[in-house]
Structure formats: C-alpha cells, structure tokens
Amino acid sequence: MAVTSSGARAARPDGGRPRAGRLSSVYGLVASVALGSLLLAVVGAVTGPHWDPGPLEDGIEVATTDTAIGGAPEPGTYEVRTVDVSVRLDGTSVGARLSLPVGLAEAGPAVLFVHGAGTGRSTQAFRRQAQALAEAGVVAMVPDKRLDTYSTRHRDYVAMAADYHRSLDVLRDRPEVDPARVVVYAESEGGWIAPVMAADDPGIAGLVLVSSPVVPPRQQAAFAVDAYLRNTGVPHAVFRAIPRAVGMSMPGGGFEYADFDVRPWQQRLTQPVLVVYGTADASMPIVQGALQVRADAAQAGNRDVTVRYYADADHGIRVGGSPTPEFLRDLSGWVLGLPATGDGAPRVAGAEPSQAYVAGPVPQPRWLRDGTALLVLVIGAPALMVLCALAVAATRVVQRTTSARAGGGAVRTPRRFAPGVAVRLAALGGVTVATVGALVWYLLSVARLALDYQRDAWVVQGGWLGVRVLGVGAVLVAVLLARRVHDARQEGVPVAPGVVRRVAAAGVLGGSAVLLVVLAYWGVYQLNI
C-alpha cells in the first residue's frame, strides 16, 4: 500500500476498495446478467412453440418447358365490346363488367372471374385476362366483390361462393353464352371459393386455379412469412415470431376463416381443372399446391388436372407488371378446347418449380395464444408503471404541502426511496418499455422489407442486434437494482418507505417482469434452446 513521506496512507480514488474486490464485483455482475438472460431464454423456449418447417420431399415432374395446351384450337381474332350489368345478391347488388366478342356466330364458352384478396373492382381487376379471352372468342365476366360481408376479421368463403354463383347465373343467361360451357377462374384467395362453387354445381364446365393457396389460410400465411423472412435474411431467432404471430388468436376476435379447409370441396371436383403458378411466387406452395389438387380431384375419380408453371412470373402470373403472353394464350386455348383439353398432354409443363419447405399446420402457442390478452399486457404494463410514477410524485407533493402547513413554513424533507433505488426503478421501467418499442419497430420494419421482397442488413441484422442489446440492458438494470436493494437492507435503510412507494415499486417491478417475459416469448433472449 502506498504511503506519504510522513507515513500517512495515500488516498485511493476508489475509497480504498481493493482491486481484487472490484474485479470480483464486476465478474459477479456479468455472471448475474448472463444468468438472468439465460433464465429468460428458458422462459421464452417453454412458453411458446418452435418453428421448424419440414422439407418438401415430394416433387412434381415437368414434361416440357413448352406450356402450350395440347389439342387447343386456334383462337379467334374478335373485336371486343364491354357491357356493365348489375347482379342482385341477397340484400344488396353488385356491378359486373362483361367483355364480349363482337360477331360471334353462335353462343360460345364463357369465364367468370373470382377475385383474390382486396376490394375487387370489376373495372380494374383481370382487365388483360378478360380482354385476351374475349379477343379469342370467350365471353368474360368480372363482377365486383361483395364488400358489405367481407372484412379483414370476417370472411365466409362458402357464403362468398353463393354470391359469386348469382353472377354465374347472370352469365349463363346471356345470349352470347352456352350455359354448358361456363368456366370459373379463381386467383389467390379465390382458390378457397371457386372449388366450393364447382363442387356444388357439377354443371360448371371447368375450373382455373391461379396461384391457389390450397392449404388453409393460417398455413399459407405462415408459409409466406417464412419464405419472405428467409429471403430477407433475418436472424434465426426471428423465425420464432411466426408461430406466435400466426398461431395466436387476433385481438378483438374474428379471423375464424383462418382455418378454413377447402380440401373437402376439392375432393368432390368432377370438372377439368387448370392449375397455374408462377415460379417467382414465394407466397404460395407452388409444388405442394398442384400435388394436392391432383390428389384431391382423384378422390372423385377426376384425373383431368392440367398444371402449368410460368418462368419468373409472380403471384398474378405477371412478368414486368403484365400477365405473360404465354399464360393468356394457354388460358384461352384451354377454355376454347374443353372438354378435349381437360385431359390433353402434357399434364405438367413449364419452368421447373421450386419449393423447399412444406406448408403445414402451424404450432399453437401454449401460453400467450390469446392476442387480446397479449395486447393488454403490452399496453397495460407500461400504463401501470406510469401510474406508479405519478402516484409517487403526487405523494411527494402532498408530503411537502402537509409538512409546510404543520411546521409553520418549515419544510421537512419527505421520505424517499433508499439512495439509488428510485433511479434504478425508473431505468428498469424505461429500458423494458424501450425494448418492447424497439421490438415492435423491428418486426414492422422486417415485415415491410419482406412484403417488398427486399434486403437491408442495417435493419435486419443491425436492428435485431440493437433490440437484443436493449434486452440485455434491461437485465443489467434489474441486477443493479437488486444489488442496491440488498445493500440498503444490509445498511438498515428502508428501501421503499410508505405504502405508496411500496406499491409503486411493486408495480414497476411487476410491469417490468411482464414485459421481460413478453420479450423472452418473442425471442429476444433466444439461445436456440
């Protein structure tokens, strides 16, 4: 130990604490934070399902890259006129646009379009498809989607099939249309509607399923999110959010259609089916979907399933924003040639499709499956902490006012938390709330990138690192708070004097604990366990 020339001990900047003691304290702090993070990782692992989709082992054999429909007749070269009509539904009516070939010698084939997700306006949707069909000699009808019974929360695909069937009846009654040659064309979400129509009405001449999900909506959503996140390059821990988000019930209820299974209707299909996918469509199980339609139709003894894959085409069979000319040609040829084209060769043609993982059942969360409860926790915990802070502040004001009145103007210092406790409580609440906010921002940012099919390492990798650093920071503050409380008790200093402070401290601790569990649930502390 250093001494002065007079033999007195030299003052130490740390108050005389030995270096070994400081190192031991630091090691203890690091160990405590590591242990706390590990415990939260375990909590996150046991409170919700893992995400590990299995590889798709079954493939589909493509006979040729030429997508032309075998046996399709030469298309016509008609001029096209459009006619707007009204379709009466149960309790309302919708508009519809007809694209008519000019100069048809006799009644011919027709196609009714069934919309995918969205508003579905007859004047905007399927314009290129309807034009191409009418030019080839096929009447095309695009009805408006009924929206008074359709929302994000509530959709009834069987009821929607009944509504579209009213449009089908109007189309069959047109003088230009042979009612025995009407085909239903469904895109995306329409793939859960059109099979219901065809199963219930064997008189429908054929079914075109474009970018059909085939599997239930919940499974398709999980599959799409998984594909988008893999393309975006997110860390492995982020995939844990898929079953937790897709598997939980949504706040406020609804979404009953998420588990709608169209297979019972597909297993009753007796009509020829044309299944179409674009190889650049990452949102759909493009191999599994075609295989499932073939297997389901086979249950009814139906082998007339034709499959086409278009190279680099997206969800709407578009390349560069427009439907591919080959698709429009094949669509017209298949419809014009029915029923002969229903079993025409080749059965499977086009570009080689790729699907790495199965679109299967989504594991269900065990603890926080109720989205409403989760939302209440995420909003309620910070609100509780704010109320606790306001209560303590109000108590201090009351104490000062009461002391001033009782003491004739002399103000006594009101009781406080033990030194260092209040600031650590505030820091704990602030950091946990900040981490939750950062996590929400991160998930929304990744969702935007995923939907746009983009990569951004600063957001994807850097953002996740920032969220996890904040999460560990919350554990660090919790450890520092626990140490300070322990020291105060050892010194005999009241930690939180008064009922209000004790309740406030409990509220901040409880709210922070809830948020830490939520953060663990969403994978912030994940250690791949």
Image: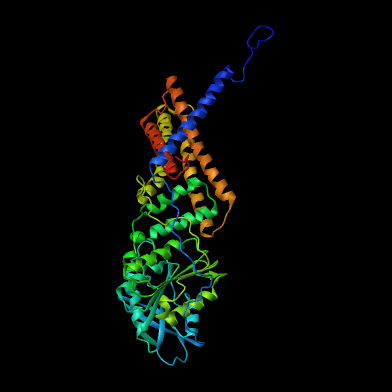
**Callout count:** 0
Rendered position, 311 above or below 142: above
Residue 360: image location, x then y, percent:
39, 55
Colouring scheme applied when the structure was drawn? rainbow
Q: Residue at x 47, y 41 (%)?
A: 528
Rendered position, 450 above or below 499: below
Residue at far right of view: 5
Instruction: State the image quarter where residue 99 is shown.
Output: bottom left
Rendered position, 469 above or below 211: above
Q: Quadrant of the N terminus?
A: top right
Residue 220: image location, x then y, percent:
42, 59
Instruction: Judge by depth and name the residue closer to the eye, 504 or 296.
Output: 296
Left or right: where 57 falls relative to 10: left
Q: Quadrant of the C terminus?
A: top left
Residue 251: image location, x then y, percent:
37, 54
Left or right: where 43 falls relative to 68: left
Residue 366: image location, x then y, percent:
35, 45
Instruction: Judge by depth and name the residue closer to the eye, 240 or 393.
Output: 240
Instruction: Judge by depth and name the residue closer to the eye, 336 or 218.
Output: 336
Does the rendering let one see residue 225? Answer: yes
Residue at far top of view: 6
Does the rendering let one see residue 422? Answer: no
Q: Residue at x 44, y 41 (%)?
A: 520
